[in-house]
Amino acid sequence: MKYVIQSTKLGVIGEEFEPSPGINVAALLDGGFIAIQESTDSTKKAPTIKKTPKE
Amino acid sequence: MATTTFLSNITTLTVNAVDLSDQATAIVFTNMREQLDKSTLKDTSRLFTGGLFNNECTMTLFQSYAASETYATLAALVGTATTVVATVTEGAVTKTFTLANCYLESMPVVNGALGELSTVDLTFTGGTFTAS
């Protein structure tokens, strides 16, 4: 999970935002200045579903 | 005696990392340490020593309810601690003043008068003051 800038008041839109100590991240999220981007790990395999043998 | 005069040019003003310099009309950064009375019966005048730091930053901003502006920046900060950074430049010298973990107790949500631009006066208290 990472934060992505959504406003030019904070930085370049689309760039990752790394909050420094003392920054209220919840307020930035609430004000729409940043958004949460879930990391997509393409190397991660999808979980396999085991089939139960038919009797 | 050499003197310099300084036009109050705040080149950067951020509240919670959000740049609000285009909304600010005034700012006062105060580095303050409480005085503790250490006078004794032997003294003929009061003597003080430094106690806890009790820093303060007051500012006046134009109110704006537009996205990414004054209200959006401050609304969720009331009752929490944040960081205020102000940078001033005089010639080749740049000073950056930071008040980290300062507390915002209140914010006027409506402050209007006929024929005037709406402003908000804010006071951030406490926190750690650094100058670089």
Image (cartoon, coloured by chain):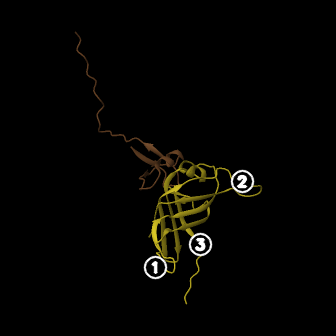
Q: Chain of mark 2?
A: B
Q: Which residue is mark 3?
A: B8
Q: Residue at x 51, y 56 (%)?
A: B103
Q: Is residue B92 above or below residue B34?
A: below
Badge 1: how crowded within 10 Å, few (<14), some, or many (20+)? few
Earlier sequence position, callout 3 versus callout 2? 3
Q: Which residue is mark 2?
A: B112
Q: Which residue is mark 1?
A: B42
Q: Residue B118: which disc?
A: none
- Nearer mark to the viewer, of 3 and 1: 1
Q: Amino acid at mark 2?
A: Gly
- Nearer mark to the viewer, of 3 and 2: 2
Return the residue nearer the eye: B84 or A1.
Answer: B84
| Mark 2 secondary-structure assignment | loop
Q: Which chain is brown?
A: A
Colour chain B appears in:
yellow
Q: Chain of mark 1?
A: B
